[in-house]
Every structure is written in structure tokens, then in C-alpha cells.
Image (spheres, rainbow, N blue to C red):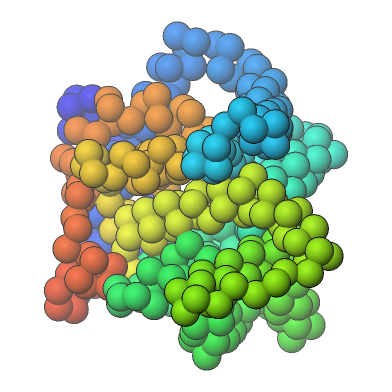
Amino acid sequence: MNAASNAAPSTSRLASELRINAEDAARSQRIRQGILEAGNALRARHPWLEKHQNAIGMTIFWASIAGILGTAWAYYAGAIAWYVAIPLAAFCMSILHELEHDLIHMMYFRKNKFWNDFMLAGVWLFRPSTISPWVRRRLHIHHHKVSGTETDLEERGITNGEKWGVKRLLMTGDNMLAIYLRPFATYKMTRAFVREVSKTKEEAHSIARENVLGYFPLGVINYALWHGFIVYHATLITLGLFGIHPAIPAVLESVMSVVNFYAVVIAAPNALRTFCLHFVSSNMHYYGDVEKGNIVQQCQIWTTPWAIPLHLFCFNFAGTHAFHHFVVRDAFYIRQWLAPGLYPLMRENGVRFNDFGTFKRANRMHAKPVLRAVPAVQKAAA
């Protein structure tokens, strides 16, 4: 790997690399070449990874769903307690989230839209707290182009760039609170995104409507039940502290028994998974002082042991996601497989590791703004 990192890049320069500082452009090429070579070598040793990629994705899809349904049945039957059911289901849902990400990049059934859409529908059904995967596809593709800048709505939406405090903590695990607690900021960032990705006024209106309806219908239903569950039990607990124990109507008790079950097997696991993923993702991506198109500056890598409990519910996201910014083609399990061997390459070429000072810097790379002079050659190339 050291040889690959020191060799002259053989990969072609990306268009964005013509507009960034020459040093990071060269680093980006070396990293991309190293990741491609490592992935090619892995596929050469295990040709089944490429030959059966669709089957692998579909197997992961059904195994994860079976895990969620099996957990729900075990909880219903009284075989496991709620505090066992929630993390088990959350783990399975986290795998579905990684699968959704790969489906968005058409890594499975690229030539068969029906099965790709079928799997997207399935992963959304069991993760109803999320935005529609078809809406997310536009957000995510744009994220790759502008990561760390104002119009990166995907990351801004999950609190990247916000100052840390109670408000951000609440927003991190709840997509609706992330909207309700900053309505004007949400409107501003959404408007910036729409302006950036649309070419005509009609297209802008269409994309705006798409975003407004992104959580319909599954997200609307999920958060109504989840927030209702929280308010109901918080009210009973508060009244109990004052010695008040109201009589609950039989109809309400019946309704709440269903809501309670849904909360344990779907809503709470999704909230746990969401918090872990958004905490990790929003903090391992830099924001604000990132040079547009400079992939070396977009992400850091976490290898710290204290992040392991978080990574259990987002498949070691901060340990592997940076690779994806350089090379999109590798599925989530491939990135994990390659990670240990690629870390030296990333370090040697300027990708930061465990830079937790960003918690104080609202995800900025630097404590103070850094001004870079753009060489005349690069200006001409741009």
C-alpha cells in the first residue's frame, strides 16, 4: 500500500480536481488509485463478490427483514424483553440503511429497475422514519458533488455544521425535530439546494414539492405514532410524580397497546439507529471551510474505541465512509473488508483521523478560516 501511495497517479483527474489546490488534487488521485487497486485485488481473489453481487444484496435484504420480523415475534411471544428487542431490530435496520445507500448508487440490479425499486421500497418500509429513498437519491448524488458546502442538504439536514448543544442532540435522533426546531434554517438550506440542482423554474417547483412530500406517507405515520407514544407516557409519568393516576379509557388502552408494540419493534429501533448514524455521519463530515470538490477535506475517519457502540448501529460508518467519497463503486461490506489495509494510504495523503476538535468547531476543519491562493494555472484550467 505504501508503494501505491507514493507512485505517480495513473487514474484520470476528476473535473472537480482541476479547480482545487494542486497538492490535494494529487493526494486525491493517489487515494483513489489505491482504493481501486485494493478493490480489484480483492475481487481477483474472490471473483464471487462481483459475479454474485445482486444475489449478495438480495440475501442481505431478506436476512435483515427476517431479523426484524423475528425480533418482533420474539418480543410479542414474551421470549425477549423490550431492551433486547430494540437493539436487535436496530442492528438489522442499520444493515438495511447501508443496503439502501448502495441501491441509491445502483450497486444491485443496475439493469433491472423493478428489483432495484422493490428493494428500495422494502428498506423504506422497515425504516419508516427516513425520507423516501427516491427523494434521497437526488440529495445523495448532490452530496457527493458539494459535500461540506451550503447546498449539501443531505448532511445539513442531519445537523452537520450546527453548534453542539441540547438542541442539536435532540435533532440528531429525530428527523422531524431537525425540521421543527430550526424552521427558518431548514427553509434556507432547502431553498439553496433547490436553486443549485434545478435548471428551470418549473423544475425548481417540482423538486421543492418532492422534498416537502419526502416523508409522506411512511414518515408522517411513523412520527405521529412515535411522538404520540412519547407524549402519552411522559404525561403519565409526570402525573404520577404528583400522585395523580388518571383512569385510562378501555379504548385508549387498546390503542396504546398497539402503539406500544409498534414503538418497541419499529419506532424505537429506528430512533436508536438514526441517532447513532446521524451522530457519526454529521460529525465525520466537515462543513463550512471545505474547498468545493476537494474530497481530501470532506471526511475524517474514526478508529477510536469509544465509537464502537455507535458503529454497531451504522456498520462502522465513520471507519469506512471516507473511502466511498473517493471511490463510489464498492458496497458497504467491501469497504469494511478493505478498511484496515487502506488506513495507511489515507493517513499518508492527508485524511484526518479522530479529529474530535470538530465538536467545538461546529464541524469546521480549522479553528479559524483559512484563505488559499488559487494558482493561475488552476484558474485557467477551471
Residue 146 location (% of width, % of height): 45, 66
Residue 361 higher or lower than 218, as above or below: below
Dividing the picture into quadrants, the one containing residue 198 is bottom right
Dividing the picture into quadrants, the one containing residue 260 is bottom right
In the foreground, 155 or 38: 155
Residue 203 location (% of width, % of height): 75, 77
Instruction: Note whether residue 211 is visible.
Output: no
The quarter of the image holding the N terminus is: top left
Q: Residue at x 34, y 41 (%)?
A: 309
Q: Residue at x 64, y 16 (%)?
A: 51
Instruction: Note whether residue 24 is visible.
Output: yes
Residue 110 higher or lower than 205, as above or below: above
Residue 160 location (% of width, % of height): 39, 68
Tell me if 378 is positioned left or right of 115 in this view: left
Tell me if 283 is positioned left or right of 365 in this view: right
Residue 352 location (% of width, % of height): 20, 50
Q: Residue at x 73, y 54 (%)?
A: 257
Q: Residue at x 24, y 34 (%)?
A: 343
